[in-house]
Amino acid sequence: MQKNQILYLLGAYPQWSETFVRQDLALLQELELPLCPVALFPGDSARQADWPEVRYLDSSPAAVGGAPSALAACSRLLPRYVATRLSLFHHRRRVQALAELARSLGARHIHAEFADLPALVGAAVARRLGLGYSLSVHARDVHVAKFSPGLVYGGARFVLACNRDAWRGVNRYRCAARAGVHLIHHGLDLANWHFREPPPPGAPLRLMFVGRLVEKKGLNVLFRALALLRDQGRSVRLSLYGDGPLEGLLRSLGRMLGLEDALAWEGVVPREEIARRMREHDVLVMPSIVTRDGDRDGVPNVVVEAMACGLPVVGSDAGSLPEVLTPETGWVFPAGRESALAAAVEQMFGAPGETRARCQAARQLVVREYDARALARKRAGLLHSVLE
């Protein structure tokens, strides 16, 4: 089979928080799909030696921001179809560059990750050259859609959704539903995630959070829950792995609540190191919320990772978390309620036998439904079908 028949289009690559993109791409390459990975611009991390290589349409750091802030502000005031056309005009050089690359490689199909700029550019090139087109959707790109659905989903051969919440959201658009929306989760290479029985929690109770410091993660709820636990006499400590635009505000909130000595700001840590750090903590906390503009989590990768290796999970019922987090596999509380979060942590702390049972059930769920290699074969089957 001719190489490079499918242009696999990413936005910013590599991104620290998008481990699933690197993993899925690597597994598809192992299955010998004729892929040419292309990124619109560099991401926020340096590429590691074992990460997939990509071509860049624009390698200059200035490209990372996309549209100028004035243009973005103006676009928010316009009807979405008009704003989409304005964005296409702004990114016309990227459309032209991708079209030239597709012609030079003899590409037959374009698959875009995320229903935002990669999908907009990929769909425009596919229409211009008469190529096949498909895309993957995740969370924010569905629930806080930037662009006209007709231009993003119209003409797609299929759409891949990685969680049920996104699957339901995409099916609202008739043009996407006509293409066929397939639910295929992101998973784990289970050989790299070994289960251990959770040890009895000690004192202080060691909590960890992993992810971007953004509104939908609900960290203000978590901080207030920590303050409640301390008021009730519980000794707790929280390690935060990640960074993001809300770090300054969250540090201020921590000081206001008197939590300075209970918070460890660990910053960005490699995924392999996160696996080791999980064994140093008693529970992963995922206090996600649905924001005012509709943004929410899908199934955070770190939740599946924690379940795979036997770390108890306490999380909210926001977004697609209930797909994996149930009263059988962890501790669920109503999103946005710090008292319920504190009570869930207390419940987990006081029931070591129940904790072991739920962690074992969580591992079984991951093995059954989140085996990354099996899921990659499903993705590969769909991509092969567009070339036949």
Image (cartoon, rainbow, N blue to C red):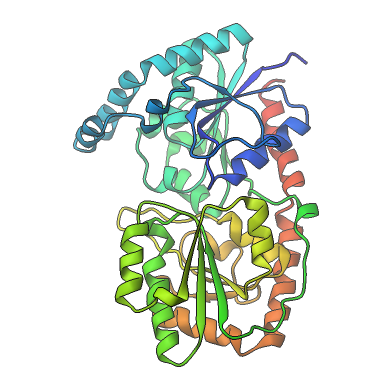
Count all numbered tags in the image, as a single digit: 0
Return the residue found at the far bottom.
233
Q: Is residue 346 visible?
A: yes
Rendered-image quadrant of the N terminus: top right
Residue 223: x and y, percent? Answer: 40, 73
Q: Nearer the viewer, residue 322 or 228?
A: 228
- Kindly indicate the quadrant of the structure image that contains residue 385: top right
Horizontal relation, residue 44 to residue 247: left or right: right
State the residue at coordinates (69%, 61%).
276
Rendered-image quadrant of the C terminus: top right
Q: Nearer the viewer, residue 254 or 82?
A: 254
Horizontal relation, residue 385 to residue 270: left or right: right
Q: Nearer the viewer, residue 305 or 238?
A: 238
Q: Is residue 172 visible?
A: no
State the residue at coordinates (66%, 35%).
25
Above or below: residue 128 compared with residue 112: above
State the residue at coordinates (32%, 70%).
253
Above or below: residue 310 compared with residue 43: below
State the residue at coordinates (56%, 56%).
299
- Kindly indicate the quadrant of the structure image that contains residue 102: top right
Residue 349: x and y, percent? Answer: 60, 86
Return the residue found at the far top.
104
Return the residue found at the far right.
191
Residue 36: x and y, percent? Answer: 64, 21
Above or below: residue 381 compared with residue 313: above
Residue 256: x and y, percent? Answer: 29, 75
